[in-house]
Image (tube, rainbow, N blue to C red):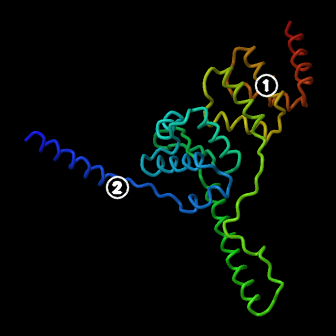
Amino acid sequence: MNQANGTGDFVSWAAGASAGMNQGMTVIPYALLRYYRTIGLNSSECMLLIHLLGFQQVEHKGFPSLEELQQVTGATTEMIAMILQKLMKEGLLGIDEHVDEERGIQYERYNLSGLYAKLGHCLAEESKGESEGAKAADNSRKGNNSASLDTFRFNKPAASKTTPVEEERNLFSIFEKEFGRPLSPMELETISGWVDQDRYPDELILLALKEAVFAGKVHFRYIDRILLEWSRNRVRTAQDAKAYTQKFRNIGR
């Protein structure tokens, strides 16, 4: 009797889980599954994007933590942070800041519009290839030998390319060592901004970090202020930074 009840409970639980899955499905763009390799992603990076969609759509979490992503992917937080950084660097993922006006709380949310734009481009390219392919086939039937196989571009693989991330990985590792913890996605994006947008040399960024450690103010806002101050005073190289810093230390004596 107890065994029967146990079996019944199991069936009921399974039925409930099935109903729950029907109510909590994640909508995944088929274009992502079809073109993720074309836009230069591997299966782990694609899976992480799918999990971000799941958090947004089902759990209503626009900015899951590295630990939450670790639980669902099984990857280390360091690896997840590196993947997120790559996605942001390549313009597939962004971070938007919002303010809850009712509670006055600022929060972040991952933005996948860059990903959708790339996938849209892939769809447009395929449509264009199909159109050109049909036109070429028609010309061929009419005896026009000028039609070229180059017009057929079905699922054209992305050209192999190397992205300059090794230097940034070095920066990330050094910052994590000094901070004594993994960097957050926002912090990774800040470092990328210093390198890609502000064009600060790596050695200058590391010197700013060293100055922050020396001052006992190891946080990103302080480091950013140092870099901004150097930029305003035309400090371009590590040598300039050392001379500028030494000058003010001598004044303070």
Q: Is residue 109 above or below residue 177?
A: below
Q: What residue is shown at x 68% (from left), y 38% (from top)?
A: 189
Q: Residue furthest top?
A: 253
Q: What residue is shown at x 45% (from left), y 52% (from top)?
A: 57
N-terminal-most mark, 2 or 1: 2
Element on which disc 1 rests: helix
Q: Position of residue 135 (x, y in %)?
A: 73, 84
Left/right placement of residue 19 relative to residue 178 reads left
Q: Amino acid at mark 2?
A: Gln
Q: Amino acid at mark 1?
A: Leu
Q: Position of residue 91 (x, y in %)?
A: 69, 50
Q: Is residue 119 above or below residue 53?
A: below
Q: Residue 206's mark? A: 1
Q: Is residue 8 above or below residue 36?
A: above
Q: Which residue is mark 2?
A: 23
Q: What residue is shown at x 47% (from left), y 44% (from top)?
A: 61
